[in-house]
Image (cartoon, grey):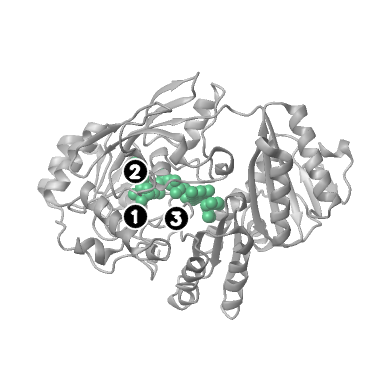
């Protein structure tokens, strides 16, 4: 055991005391929709009048990072980004763009992983970063009302000062914005505990393509008056409206948090440990994450400052199990009896429990660091799938076999407790030959098991043509009708989410 990492080690038997920039080939549209106008001086002048000079970005260097996604996989050619600071300004900008048929891409923290926030051609980028005010917080109900551009981590710090936590947490929390989270219906590390944003979001204010402000910014737990339209904006990836403000329910912050890191011999056993965790930990279980040895190796290789909590152990799978509760003694007792059982039954070969917040952060640093390590390793093809848990890892193994002759590294990790696999193929360059070995194989494999080709990242431009693998045609047709009702000219985030041929045909 390393002194610096004072974790208590669990091995074999546990005594009670111990238990303390290249465009992907799968891009949505190959050619620009010529029904959209191109920018003219009069447009830039109008935007300067409404937003002020400093919020109209035309400088090539300043536009470059806005035209590129977090992975460096998608690149756009926008010549203009706008930074409105109020809902009224968003409304004026959209009404104008709609009249002029100028296409718009909403962009929040630009941490999305499917190219949704990146223009394909010369679409105008609408930045939400200027909408960054907290409007109110009710410390009795835990209801937060804020503008869409607030950064998730900042919101969490603010509500934490009042004894609450944000109902979602993800590795990109330092950059992603709540409006982006809602628009992608982000899942993250604690969905298992707090559910999806479809439950936590109480209200939304959004601006439609024609500038209409939809004020559905309620703060009510219960409201059965007609259709719940806010739900349509959750996960619609900026194709139905620009979300300008959100109200959401924050759960109380847990005073007792424990995190353990467990080494497991095979994938079938990860599920047995999960069943046991739900039985023994019950209401305090707050996260159940997994990654394979390949993901761990890659993270240790590419990220500085990451320590392997079990340096002497090599096993195919690792789990991060977190409990969050309010009674240290009670939570500890539960965790100990869970760990005793899984060790005695030899489901877990080795493990550690974090002893303080630094060690908790250390363990989470490995799990959250996987995406960053993959980025450091080079280009990566990312797949985010919902698959029945029992079969989930078969896909990683089959993909590995199919690609054994290619210079790639296939890794698997994800939110096991939610049935969400992240299959990643790391390579040296984006290459159609590599892609041909992954797609449509991965989508067909998932569809054959009635899974979803997007569990939490969305469809964006990466999978706009692929929705049929998960949704039957009548459902896609209904979505196209909804899109047409909200945005008849199709100016909002074109070439994303829905198949282009059909969207244009509408
Ligand atoms: P952006 O990337 O800017 O935009 C995403 C989409 O939403 C785009 O289609 C954009 O047009 C649209 N959009 C953004 N803001 C608005 C708005 N106000 N109104 C209308 N449309 C809007 N995702 C998960 O689900 N779970 C994870 O665990 C997770 N972990 C991640 C870890 C890392 C290191 C990284 C880089 C990403 C991770 N992601 C994860 C993906 C990403 O962070 C989420 O999708 C996040 O919700 C995107 O927020 P954003 O503000 O960056 O949005
Ligand atoms: C995660 O769970 O780490 C995120 O969804 C990001 C990713 O898939 O890389
Ligand atoms: Zn994820």
Residue that mark 3 sits on: 113
Q: Which residue is mark 1?
A: 118
Element type at mark 1 = loop
- CB at disc 2 and ligand 1 closer than 8 Å: yes
Whichever of labels 1 and 3 marks the residue nearer the N terminus, that label is 3
Q: Which residue shows up at 24% across the image and 48% down it?
A: 58
Spot the residue most to the top.
140
Mark 2 crowdedness (10 Å alpha carbons): few <14, some 14-19, many ≥20: many
Residue 245: horizontal and vertical position, in percent?
Answer: 34, 33
Bin the neighbour count of mark 3 within 10 Å (Cα to Cα): few under 14, some 14-19, many 20 and up.
many
For the residue pair 103 and 175, the one nearer the viewer reads as 103
In the displayed structure, 372 sits above or below 194; it is below
Residue denoted by label 2: 233
Judged from this view, the residue extending furthest toward the bottom is 405
Query: Is residue 312 among what the camera can see?
Result: yes
Residues 276 and 71: in front is 276
Earlier along the polypeptide chain: callout 3 or callout 2? 3
């Amino acid at each position: 055991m390393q002194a610096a990492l004072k974790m208590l080690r669990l091995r074999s038997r546990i005594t009670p005391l111990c238990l303390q920039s290249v465009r992907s080939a799968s891009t949505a549209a190959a050619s620009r929709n010529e029904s959209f106008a191109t920018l003219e001086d009069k447009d830039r002048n109008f935007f300067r009048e409404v937003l002020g000079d400093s919020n109209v970005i035309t400088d090539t260097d300043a536009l470059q990072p806005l035209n590129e996604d977090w992975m460096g996989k998608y690149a756009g050619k926008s010549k203009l980004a706008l930074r409105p600071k109020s809902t009224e300004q968003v409304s004026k900008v959209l009404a104008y763009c709609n009249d002029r048929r100028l296409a718009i891409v909403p962009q929040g923290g630009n941490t999305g992983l499917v190219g949704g926030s990146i223009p394909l051609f010369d679409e105008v980028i609408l930045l939400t970063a200027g909408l960054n005010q907290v409007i109110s917080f009710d410390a009795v109900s835990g209801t937060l009302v804020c503008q869409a551009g607030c950064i998730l981590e900042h919101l969490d710090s603010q509500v934490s000062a009042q004894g609450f936590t944000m109902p979602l947490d993800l590795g990109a929390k330092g950059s992603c914005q709540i409006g982006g989270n809602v628009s992608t219906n982000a899942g993250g590390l604690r969905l298992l505990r707090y559910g999806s944003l479809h439950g936590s979001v109480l209200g939304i204010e959004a601006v439609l393509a024609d500038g209409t402000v939809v004020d559905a910014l309620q703060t009510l737990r219960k409201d059965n008056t007609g259709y719940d339209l806010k739900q349509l904006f959750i996960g619609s990836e900026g194709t139905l409206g620009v979300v300008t403000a959100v109200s959401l329910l924050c759960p109380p912050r847990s005073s007792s948090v424990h995190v353990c890191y467990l080494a497991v011999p095979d994938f079938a056993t990860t599920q047995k440990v999960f069943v046991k965790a739900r039985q023994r930990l019950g209401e305090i279980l707050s996260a159940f994450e997994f990654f394979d040895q390949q993901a761990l190796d890659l993270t240790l290789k590419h990220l500085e400052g990451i320590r392997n909590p079990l340096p002497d152990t090599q096993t195919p799978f690792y789990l991060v199990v977190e409990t969050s509760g309010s009674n240290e003694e009670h939570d500890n007792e539960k965790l100990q009896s869970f760990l005793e059982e899984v060790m005695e039954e030899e489901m877990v070969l080795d493990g550690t429990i974090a002893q303080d917040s630094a060690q908790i952060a250390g363990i989470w640093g490995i799990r959250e660091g996987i995406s960053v390590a993959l980025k450091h390793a080079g280009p990566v093809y990312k797949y985010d799938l919902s698959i029945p848990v029992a079969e989930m890892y078969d896909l990683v193994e089959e993909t590995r076999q199919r690609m054994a002759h290619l210079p790639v590294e296939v890794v698997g990790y994800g939110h096991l407790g939610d049935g969400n696999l992240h299959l990643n193929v790391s390579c040296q360059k984006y290459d159609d030959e590599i892609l041909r070995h992954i797609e449509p194989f991965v989508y067909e494999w998932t569809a054959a098991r009635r899974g979803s080709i997007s569990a939490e990242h969305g469809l964006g431009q990466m999978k706009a043509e692929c929705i049929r693998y998960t949704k039957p045609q009548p459902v896609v047709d209904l979505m196209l009708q909804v899109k047409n009702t909200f945005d008849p000219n199709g100016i909002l985030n074109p070439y994303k989410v829905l198949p282009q041929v059909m969207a244009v045909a509408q």
